[in-house]
Each structure stands twice: as structure tokens, then as C-alpha cells.
């Protein structure tokens, strides 16, 4: 199968063929990365954390199911949801994050919320966990690659944290910056994206009750590979808008740059609403496969506008969603 190359000669992300990492990284870098992973990964804490998930004894989070915002669909298994991941800081293959993300240190962790706000603040993760009552919300998440999962997330509406800092009248967009630390993240050695991973939302999107600040899934804290200790879940947009391991939330007056838009502007727009009527330049977005339904009896599901979250449609009334893809 043919796939395009970006101007700098690097295989574009999301191509359907995987280049062996040893080839694209170069042998020396590859060996350096393996060595670095071993050095950081030997920490007792990381081992304990990995063990905890393996044994199902990770820190549990008490949360009340928000039935109104939850889908009743069959949930993806924890195993699939935590071993088939996109987290390029830990490698570009689906199985890389679960293998590599044990080097991520999720304590101590702070998130700075600043920019166009009256009360900028840096919050410790333990404060974030208690900032608002934790809810369980079962959301569909659809990746731009054409697969989806149904995951019971734990967290609360992002609006809770945004209201706290009192946005000024100039706050029109929200920029999310995620951790980029070469000592913890072997994938940063590959220039597949312009690190750090940055995403953005318009202010009214960020304030929508569905936009979730997630700290857990399946009743436990997030596994590292799913974006521990805190990430975004925007269920009506393609998965890449749901930034993992957030360190900074900045309110801004202008539309922020985003990592995916930088890498391939014609493929990944700022809005990135799930929209079966707008094809990705290299493939159709009309259908998706649900992870866990693979195999002989696999059904192709029709992809729904806004991933089925019709309640957000009013945010885009009057907008041409083919132009603002
Ligand atoms: N920091 C960071 N966040 C990220 C990504 C990433 O590579 N790095 N991948 C995105 C993509 S493409 C998807 S589909 C989702 C996947 O989330 P999951 O692995 O928990 O299902 O995370 C998103 N958030
Ligand atoms: Mo994705």
C-alpha cells in the first residue's frame, strides 16, 4: 500500500504501515533509548505501579456514575483499553505505550492553569483529585484512524477547574500542554511530532459539560499508558484532541497551535469533530471498528456525527464543518 511522506521525509503519522522502529530511529538512537528506558525504569516506584495494575490493585477511586452522560453500550475490556494505545511519547506502535510507559513518574505532579485568567494557579494532582466530586462516565472515544472504544472514565467536567481561575473576557480558547521529558519518554527521540504534544479547544467547547478532565478509568487511577495522572476526554472529537498527562492549561485570546495540525495541516484541523461526511485525505471516515469486536465476526459500525453526542451540535451552528474540519 502506498503512503505519503511529509516534506521532511518522515513517514506521516497514522500511515497504515509501520516502519520498524530500529529503521526509522537509526540503530544508535534505538540502543540509546533502550538503555535510557532501562535506567529510569529500574525505579522501585515504577515497578510497583506496573505490578499494581497487573494485579488489579492500583489505587481505586470512588466515583458516582453519571448515567445521563453515559452510554449503555458494551464496555471495552480493561485489557484492550490499556494495551492498545496511542501515546507517541512512548512509541508509535499500539503496543508500545503499555510496554514503555512505566517510566512515567506521576508523583509529584502539578498542573498550571494560567493565561487570560484572574486567578492563575498551580495545582497539585492530589488537589485536582478533590477539586470536584468524581463521576464515572462511560464515553465512546473514536480515533481518527477508524477504531473506537467504550470506556468508563473517572473525573469531572473540565469547566469546574476553568471556573476556579476566573477567565477574563479575552479568554477565547484553551491550550493544553502535556509532559515532554526525554528522561521519561523514549518516543521524544523521534521527531514524529513537534514536542510537546499540544492541543486546544474553543472556550465554549471546553466549558461544555461533556468535556471531561479524567483522572481514572474502570474505577482506578489512570494507567500511565492512558495518560496518567490527568488527561482530557472530548468524546465528540477524534481521539487526538484528548491530550494525555497534562501539565499546563492556558487560556488564550487566539486559536492555539496544535501538534497534529502542525504535523499535517491538511489532515488534522483544529476542530477535528467526528464527522463521517469529511474524509481524512487518505481514508474514509464513514465507518469504524470497535476494539474487541475484531476477528471473523467483526462488524463495521457506521460512524455518527459528533460521535453520537448530538448535544454539542449547537456549538457549531452556522459553521461550515467541511471548512472547519
Ligand atoms: N500526550 C499525548 N496525548 C495523546 C496522544 C499522544 O500521542 N500523546 N494520542 C492521542 C490519540 S491519537 C488518541 S486516539 C488517544 C488515545 O487514548 P487511549 O490510549 O487512552 O485510548 O489519546 C490521545 N492523546
Ligand atoms: Mo487517535
Image (cartoon, helix red, strand yellow):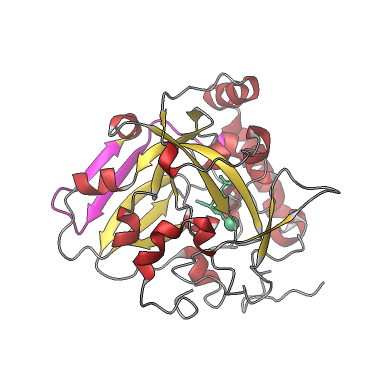
Q: At x 40% / y 60%, what residue is drawn? A: 312
Q: At x 45% / y 44%, what residue is drawn? A: 245
Nearest the eye: 258 or 220: 220
Could you tell me residue 286's position as x and y percent? 65, 68
Q: Which segment is the magenta one?
A: 103-123
Q: Is residue 229 visible?
A: no
Nearest the eye: 301 or 144: 301
16 within the magenta span: no
Q: At x 59% / y 39%, what residue is drawn? A: 101
Task: Using the image, determine if residue 179 lies above or below residue 104.
Answer: below
Nearest the eye: 124 or 303: 303
Task: Using the image, determine if residue 300 lies above or below residue 260.
Answer: above
User: To which quarter of the image does residue 189 belong?
Assistant: bottom right
Could you tell me residue 123's position as x and y percent? 27, 38
106 within the magenta span: yes
Q: Is residue 126 left or right of residue 242?
A: left
Could you tell me residue 146's position as x and y percent? 66, 60
Task: Using the image, determine if residue 196 lies above or below residue 225.
Answer: below
Q: At x 58% / y 21%, what residue is drawn? A: 52
Amino acid at each position: 500500500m502506498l503512503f505519503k511522506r511529509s516534506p521532511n521525509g518522515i513517514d506521516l503519522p497514522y500511515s497504515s504501515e509501520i516502519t520498524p522502529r530500529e529503521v526509522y530511529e537509526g540503530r544508535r538512537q534505538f540502543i540509546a533509548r533502550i538503555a535510557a528506558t532501562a535506567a529510569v525504569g529500574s525505579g522501585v516506584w515504577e515497578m510497583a505501579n506496573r505490578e499494581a495494575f497487573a494485579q488489579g490493585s492500583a489505587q481505586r477511586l470512588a466515583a458516582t456514575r453519571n448515567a445521563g452522560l453515559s452510554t449503555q453500550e458494551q464496555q471495552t475490556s480493561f485489557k484492550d483499553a490499556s494495551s492498545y494505545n496511542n501515546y507517541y511519547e512512548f512509541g508509535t506502535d499500539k503496543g508500545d505505550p503499555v510496554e514503555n510507559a512505566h517510566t512515567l513518574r506521576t508523583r509529584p505532579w502539578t498542573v498550571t492553569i494560567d493565561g487570560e485568567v484572574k486567578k492563575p494557579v498551580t495545582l497539585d494532582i492530589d488537589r485536582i483529585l478533590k477539586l470536584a466530586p468524581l463521576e464515572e462516565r462511560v464515553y465512546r472515544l473514536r480515533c481518527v484512524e477508524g477504531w473506537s472504544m467504550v470506556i468508563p472514565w473517572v473525573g469531572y467536567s473540565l469547566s469546574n477547574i476553568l471556573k476556579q481561575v476566573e477567565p477574563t473576557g479575552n479568554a477565547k480558547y484553551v491550550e493544553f500542554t502535556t509532559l515532554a521529558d526525554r528522561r521519561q519518554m523514549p518516543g521524544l527521540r523521534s521527531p514524529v511530532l513537534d514536542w510537546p504534544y499540544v492541543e486546544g479547544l474553543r472556550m465554549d467547547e471546553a466549558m461544555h459539560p461533556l468535556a471531561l478532565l479524567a483522572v481514572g478509568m474502570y474505577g482506578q487511577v489512570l494507567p500511565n499508558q492512558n495518560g496518567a495522572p490527568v488527561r482530557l476526554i472530548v468524546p465528540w472529537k477524534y481521539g487526538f484532541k484528548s491530550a494525555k498527562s497534562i501539565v499546563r492549561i492556558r487560556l488564550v485570546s487566539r486559536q492555539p497551535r496544535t501538534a497534529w495540525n502542525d504535523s499535517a495541516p491538511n489532515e488534522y484541523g483544529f476542530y477535528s469533530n467526528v464527522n463521517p461526511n469529511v474524509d481524512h485525505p487518505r481514508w474514509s471516515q464513514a465507518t469504524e471498528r470497535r476494539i474487541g469486536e475484531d476477528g471473523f465476526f467483526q462488524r463495521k459500525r457506521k460512524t455518527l456525527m459528533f460521535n453520537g453526542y448530538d448535544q454539542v451540535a449547537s456549538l457549531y451552528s452556522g459553521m461550515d464543518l467541511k471548512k472547519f474540519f
